[in-house]
Image (tube, coloured by chain):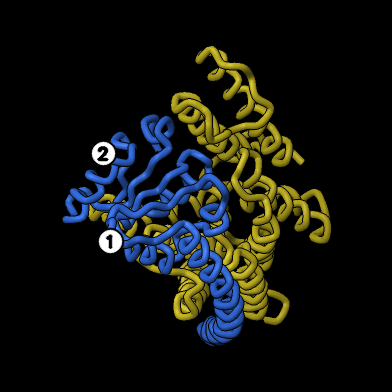
Amino acid sequence: MNGRALTEGVAVVCDRQDHAAALVEAYLRTHGGTDAEWYAPCDADEVDKAVRAGDVRRVVFPTLSAFLAALWDEVLTVEMWQAPGVGIEFADSECAVAPAQVAAILACWQHGRHRRRRQRAMAGLILSALALAAAWTVVGLAR
Amino acid sequence: MLALGLLVLIPILMWLGQSVALRAAGLPLRLRVGTADLPAPVRRANRTVTKVMFAAVLLAYPLLRGRSLPGYYAGFFPWGARPWELLHGAAAGVLYLALLYLAWMLTDNVRFGVRHDARRLARRLVGAPFTALFIALVEELLFRGVLLANLLESFSPRVALPIGIAAFAAAHYVRRVKRYWTFPGHLALGTLLCLAFFWTRALWLPVGLHAGGVLVLMAVRPFVRYTGPAWLVGASIFPYAGAVGVAALLLLTLNVWLSYGGAT
């Protein structure tokens, strides 16, 4: 995070070379935030850090699908993004997603994530036990 | 007790070094060593003092005991078939961690992806084996070759080993760190390395185990992102600090006991 983003509190998740960049720039001109800090989608975890630190209060995505991609990739700390005062906006006017719908998506995602994490942890535990058994046997036989 | 005294001096001198660097930078003194928000010159000074202190203890200890440096340290690296213990230990460390990462990747508890540009990645990967061996060698010489060896001269193994293990684990928390819940993992790691030294009376095996583990951590770090719960998979460079990691270290200790300890 640099000082600019700290003062503005606006972050954009979009590659500057992407065709959607012009759309985002136009959105920022009309909605404020022309000095926003830009992050490539692969650096969405950096935006998440800034949101968690309270440095960013508005995050602009070019489209709803760009936001959902970051969400599916589990780089966003959903609890923080659900906090009051954190705005998620979409530059594409055809998205027409209301803040309440975004909140519903986040809540639904959160619920599903808890379930998936439990399942993954259980699978991880079982497969870890098998991995340890294999490693123990091989190391034992190797001496 | 001489070794323990020398090791206790290290954090004290680290703090003094940091205080001098802070004063030189016109900043107030701090109680803890090495906070992340320190200015770069102070952090550099801290790193330098730490390295100098490690080297000073490694050099001073044998001399204070009236031994020559080669004479003292060469005793921990016997020849013949013993150097194979280094490879055995390294292979064991690599195998355990590699299989665990595979299990976690298959169950989506860690995700692999390239996180750095090609040049930085190549630099890190090429340097990893050398750094791993260097870290393992320095830490094993210090904590096993100096500290534990000295403790075993002064105390029974039942006393010396827990002190050696605790000192090794505690040393990782002298500086302010992000995570303190990793302490049991460091205790388990200390147990493995101290017992490997105790059972073999040499440093080949502990250096191999240590270097193998560090090698995997360094090689994997630029690619891995932890998505599973920390109690299961640990975090960052501490996969051995989760429940599975601690279990792995205990199992590996059992392996070492069966091969080199009381079972043989």
Marked residue chain, label 1: A
Q: Name the residue beneath numbered marker 1.
A: A94
- Residue A81 rendering spot, x and y as whole percentages: 51, 54
Q: Amino acid at mark 1?
A: Glu
Front-most of residues B52 and B44: B44
Give me the C-alpha separation between circle 1 and circle 2: 17 Å
Chain A tint in image = blue
Quadrant housing the N terminus of chain B = top right
- Residue A79 rendering spot, x and y as whole percentages: 57, 57
Instruction: Kindly identify the residue that appears in the image at 46 percent across and 56 percent down.
Output: A99
**How dense is the environment of label 1, judged by Cα within 10 Å: few (below 14), some, or many (20 and up)?**
few
Instruction: Kindly identify the residue that appears in the image at 56 percent across and 83 percent down.
Output: A123
The residue mark sitting in front, 1 or 2, is 1
Instruction: Determine if residue B19 is in view.
Output: yes
Which structural element holds mark 1? loop
Q: Quadrant of residue B262?
A: bottom right
Instruction: Kindly identify the residue that appears in the image at 51 percent across and 61 percent down.
Output: A103
Q: Name the residue beneath numbered marker 2.
A: A29
Q: Any mark on residue B238, and which? A: none
For the residues beneath circles 1 and 2, the answer to whether they share a chain is yes
Q: Earlier in the sequence, mark 1 or mark 2?
A: 2
- Residue A8 rendering spot, x and y as whole percentages: 40, 33
Chain colored yellow? B
Front-most of residues B124 and B151: B124
Which structural element holds mark 2? helix
Q: Is residue B194 rendered to the left or right of residue A119?
A: right
- Residue B167 rendering spot, x and y as whole percentages: 71, 48
Instruction: Kindly identify the residue that appears in the image at 25 percent across and 48 percent down.
Output: A24
Mark count: 2
